[in-house]
Amino acid sequence: MFDMMEATRLEKLHLAYDPATGLRAVIAIHSTRLGPALGGCRYLPYPNDEAALRDAARLAQGMSYKAALAGLRQGGGKAVILRAPHVDNRGALFEAFGRFIESLGGAYVTAVDSGTSSADMDCIAQHTEHVTSTTRGGDPSPHTALGVFAGIRASAQARLGSDDLEDLRIAVQGLGHVGFALCEHLHAAGAELLVSDLDPGKVQLAVEQFGAQPIANEALLTTPCDILAPCGLGGVLSSPVVAQLRCAVVAGAANNQLAHPDVADELEARGILYAPDYVINSGGLIYVALQHQGQELPAITAHLAQIGNRLTEVFAHAQADHRSPARVADMLAERILYGHGG
């Protein structure tokens, strides 16, 4: 456990168990150097406790880097609740999780993530103020999608010479709240959409609303396109997959898209531009962080608009240094967090 914490520079790891509700939760706090750690709460089944711990730690590190490059006064954290096959009272479970957060004294602020909803955040909010994206606060997914759209335009400009997406073939893997909202923006911009999702109903809806071409989930990653947008769960870009990619750009909303860090160099070697995930998908974090600080929507929207500019800066550094944008983004984030680039 401590080797994992050292490898990710994790500050603290908190565990909670509540037998009355069945709550088994992990909160990983990566950094509080810039402010309280903020990050979503996942509610997913995990094969074992170690997998849950590693997921929380890796995601918390990504949140620290994301907040740093987004210019936010926030640290990075992540929570995972291990989802059991049966839960008697979901509301009571999330209330117990709210009490767990409150016990940390404001060191961690939670938000929606995979498997959780604004209704779950409402339950948490009954016991702590250190929660965002409640029903009153609204769903951050549209803001994530808007930021990813801006990032795709910046990526197209950097690799294809224009940010005009008209008639570009863009493959979107994953049609959840963010992926589907992204398709709306891409369709309005005139892009030709290729889509996949494990839920055939979501695929059919994208076909009907956007004229999208459905592709089998396992085939989408290697389908010829201009831009690949992974918008599901992480780890989809492995070495074997990268060797088969037929796209010019990878720019999507999923967290931790790279199966391991060396994949970034493999993408670079193949001439495929990679938009670092925690830079391009920072719109949701920006929204919940600034809203939690009491800022109004115009100020939040203005901050979101800077995502494309930040990616352009990363791409320029990468081109000048002949390095992967992922390596450059890490260097810039670590410079902010630790005062050096490593």
Image (tube, helix red, strand yellow):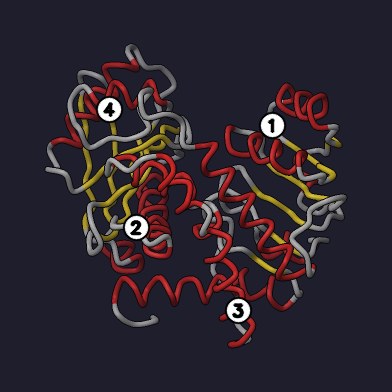
In this rendering, is residue 140 above or below 171?
A: above
For discs 2 and 4, the disc positioned in front in the rendered view: 2
Q: What's the distance in space between the residues labelled 2 and 4, CA to CA? A: 31 Å
Q: Quadrant of the C terminus?
A: bottom left
Left or right: 256 in relation to 24? right
Residue at 41%, 34% in the rendered image:
112
Disc 4 element? strand
Q: Judge depth for marks 3 and 4 and give the one in front.
A: 3
Quadrant into which the N terminus falls: bottom left
Q: Nearer the viewer, residue 184 or 253?
A: 184
Residue situated in front as seen by the camera: 92 or 149: 149
Q: Secondary structure at mark 3?
A: helix
Q: Which residue is mark 3?
A: 316
**Residue at the far bottom in the pictured view:** 321
Look at label 1 and name its amino acid: Leu
Q: Is residue 223 left or right of residue 63?
A: right
Q: Which mark is residue 198?
A: 1
**Residues at marks 1 and 2, CA–CA distance in whole angstroms:** 34 Å
Query: Tag 1's secondary structure?
Result: loop
Where residue 246 appears, x then y in whole percent?
83, 61
